[in-house]
Structure formats: C-alpha cells, structure tokens
Image (cartoon, rainbow, N blue to C red):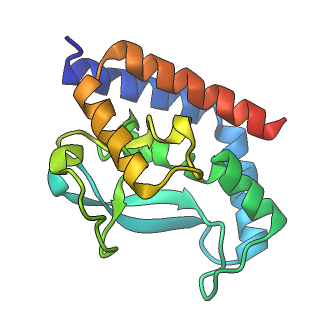
Amino acid sequence: MYKKYIKRLLDIIISLIFILILIPLYIIMYIITKIEFKGNAIFKQKRIGLNEKTYEIYKFKTMADDSKKTTKVSRFIRKVGIDEIPQFINVLKGDMSIIGPRPFIVNDPLPIPYSKLRHTVRPGLTGLAQVNGRYTLTHKKKLELDDEYINKLNFILDLKIFFKTIIYIIKEIF
C-alpha cells in the first residue's frame, strides 16, 4: 500500500530537487514577469485543498492585474506550465502534492455534481486529467479522471503521471 507519509516524503524530496534545478528559470521568469506586467511577479490565489482547507497557491503572473491581457510570452508560459513552478513551494509547505487533482478556486462556483472525494487528498501540480488532455477535456471528464486517480492512488500511477507530465512539457517546448 502506498502510504501517505511515503508520498509526502517523495513530494518534499522531488520539490527540493526541482527548486534547486530550476533556480535559474525562477530568476529568468521573475525578470520576465516584472518587465511584462509590472508589480509583483508572483500571483496568489485562494484555493481549496485537503479536507476543504483553503490556502494560497503561488504562480508566476501571466496577466495584467487590471485586465485579461496576455502576451505571446505569457501564453507560452501558461501552455508549458512554467507559471506553475512556484507551486513547488506549496508542495514543501504541505498545501499540495506533486501529483493529485488540481485544486478548485475559492469563491468560484463548484461544478455540479462533483465528488468531495477530491478533498481527501492533497491537490496536485499535475494529475491524471492534465496528462490525458488538459485543455481539451470537458469539466465533467476532468472530475471523473480526478476521482479515478483517487480511487486507484498508488506509486506506479504517480510515477506514470509524473513521467507523462515531463514528456508533455518537453513536447510543448520543442
């Protein structure tokens, strides 16, 4: 059985490794974001996490504060998922996991119907829905895949999702 404490330990180790490896990218992204959008480079947003507890998720800003304005650079950043890199801090804090269902935004209407099963695990940076179509899936299908992930949760499934995510990012970059 895939114990929660083993998953948590792996989350911490993997996050630390990625944070160290990605420090140059953090710096570059911080500079790009400051130039593109002025002000704070990190966007914070309240999300619903484990046991329906709210927390602040961190992302690189990809839109201007006062509009939905994006640029070619910011669209690429979102497409590849680079804006999600600061969430490794959320993983270290225990708000998130590397793999799990993506968290709902606080004060957004919750999809009906949805299973509260998703709140029995930490939300993730990536998940089964993200590696099976991400933007092309209906909201209903994403929720079904989230429930499937939670019901099957195991080390091998996490490993498959992790490597599918890496492959997806590499394909999007090149």
Is 113 rendered above or below residue 168?
below
Say which quadrant the N terminus sits in. top left
Say which quadrant the C terminus sits in. top right
Residue found at the far bottom of this picture:
66
Q: Residue at (20%, 48%) from the top-left corner?
A: 119
Question: Which percent across, then down, holds residue 40?
Answer: 59, 72
Q: For residue 5, which quarter of the picture?
A: top left
Q: Residue at (70%, 77%) from the top-left corner?
A: 38
Q: Is residue 102 visible?
A: no
Q: For residue 25, which quarter of the picture?
A: top right
Question: Which percent across, then down, holds residue 19?
Answer: 56, 35
Is 72 rendered above or below residue 98?
below
Q: Residue at (38%, 39%) from the top-left corner?
A: 145
Report the front residue among 45 and 129.
Answer: 129
Report the front residue among 36 and 116.
Answer: 116
Q: How many marks?
A: 0
- Could you tell whether 164 is left or right of 156 in the image? right
Q: Residue at (66%, 56%) from the top-left corner?
A: 78
Question: Which percent across, then down, holds residue 133?
Answer: 57, 42
Report the front residue among 15 and 165.
Answer: 165
- Could you tell whether 8 is left or right of 22 in the image? left
Question: Which percent across, then down, holds residue 148?
Answer: 31, 33
Q: Is residue 89 visible?
A: yes
